[in-house]
Every structure is written in C-alpha cells, then in structure tokens.
Amino acid sequence: MKKLLILKSLVDFIWIVTCIPVIPVLLFIAVYMFIDPSILEIPLEINNSKIEDLGLSLKISTLVLFVIVFIGIYCFYVFRKTLRYFQKHNPFSDFIINSYNTIGNLLVFSGITASVLFFVIKLVFESRIEVSLGLSPYIFIVCLGLFFMVLSEVFKVAKIAKEENQLTI
Amino acid sequence: MPIVVNLDVMLTKRKMKSKDLAEIIGITTANLSILKSGKAKAVRFSTLEAICEALDCQPSDILEYTQE
C-alpha cells in the first residue's frame, strides 16, 4: 500500500498544481476569444504555430481542443477518486469498474477526436496533409483508454470470482 | 438457480436446529443460512460430507435439480 500512497500523492500534486489552475484559464480564454480574438495568439505562440487567420474556424477548433482538455481533466479527476476509494473501501466494487470503464471510453474518444482535430487544423490552416505513422501522443491516449477498459473488465471478472469464493460454503 | 437446497426439510425430519448443525459441521450460522436460502454459489465436498454425516442422509436428500 506504500506504492498506492506515493501514486495518490503524485496524482494529488498534479491535480492541485496543474489541473485546478488550468480550468479557469481555459474557461476565460474560451469566452474571451469571442470578444478579442488576439488572445488566441498566446496559445499559438506557446505551440510555435504560425496561423495568421484568427477567424471563426480557429475559434471552433480551439473550443473543441478545450473540450478535449476538459475531458482529460475529468478523467484525471475520476482516476483520483478511484485511488481514494482504493484506500478506504474494497477495490473490487462496481464504482471502480464503472469508473475505469468511463475513463477508458473518454480517453479513447478524446484520443480519436484530438487526432482528427489536428489533422483538420493542419489541412485547413497550413494547407498540408500530415499523417504520423510513429508513436503519436493520440495513439498513446487511445491505447491508455483501451488499457483502462481492459482493466475494468479484469476487475469485473475478479469481483465475480471474489463473490463466488465468498459464497462457497 | 435450478439447484434447490432442501436442508430445511432434512433438519425438520431429523428434528435438529440450524445452530446445532452449524456447530457439528464446523461452519458459522451465517454461512449455513446462506446455504439454506439458496444464495450459495458452491458447496465444498467436505461441507457436504459433514452435513450428510451429521444428518445421516445422502447428498440427493439435500440437493435437488429442478428445471427453471
């Protein structure tokens, strides 16, 4: 259980330092970009992108990107909750199984959406088609999502086995 | 479940209380209650043997198959 404590502390640290401050900043940019589009130059500069047109298509792309980021933050929140549940309750429960399944589904969805979004952004704003055949972060996110779904199935099997074992007289 | 546990019937026939049977075969009354109510998923051969010995009966007197 020492490893669980270390993991929980790390996840808590990332949650407090990264996730909580990112939520209001992204919400502010998401609203403010419709008032003053020049605010989009900040994230573009951070990512070293050279996009001149700050029109509606870029705003929509940014909104979709923020939704993906929020989905990621929600996944992290659910994962943090499962770690707390691990500490206090029985790990083979419906809550853990459902949470891992939710995390898996959301990660697969966000991975696929992000890959499609960046493909479209390159096509629309830079007028080029780019297909990455190596280990891209999107494939990694999809793999992680599938891993969580498999983990959920494994926990379901373990729960049934545990129940059967408990009900063997 | 199509397997019915007739432990109650045998206990009545032998005029024995659940508590006494649990004590004889060495399981808790809670577990015996699970067995009697049909909630049990499996029965160990050792438990079945102990029950048959205590109630002087055959496994078929305790377990019965019925079509659902």
Image (cartoon, rainbow, N blue to C red):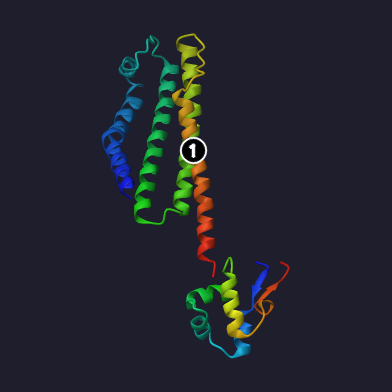
Q: Quadrant for residue A11, please give it.
A: top left
* Chain of the residue under the numbered disc 1 shown in the image: A
Percent across and percent down for residue A18 are 29, 33
Label 1: few (<14), some or many (≥20) within 10 Å?
A: some
Q: Nearer the viewer, residue B22 or A91?
A: B22
Tell me where residue A37 sits by quadrant: top left
Label 1, secondary structure: give it.
helix
| Residue drawn at point x = 42 percent, y = 34 percent | A71
Residue B10 vs residue A73, the one in the foreground? B10
In this rendering, position of residue B5 left or right of residue A2: right
Q: Quadrant of residue A164?
A: bottom right
Q: Position of residue A158 (x, y in %)?
A: 51, 53
Instruction: Tell me residue A84's x, y (percent).
Output: 34, 49
Task: Name the residue at 41% across, 38% down.
Answer: A75
State whether residue A29 is above or below residue A88: above
Which residue is farthest bottom? B15
Q: Which residue is mark 1?
A: A147
| Amino acid type assigned to the residue bearing label 1 in the image | Phe
Image quadrant occupied by the C terminus of chain A: bottom right
At x 47%, y 23%, the residue is: A135
Number of marks drawn: 1
Residue B18 coordinates in the image, percent (x, y): 53, 83
In this picture, is A114 found above or below A41? below
Q: Is residue B9 above or below residue A101?
A: below
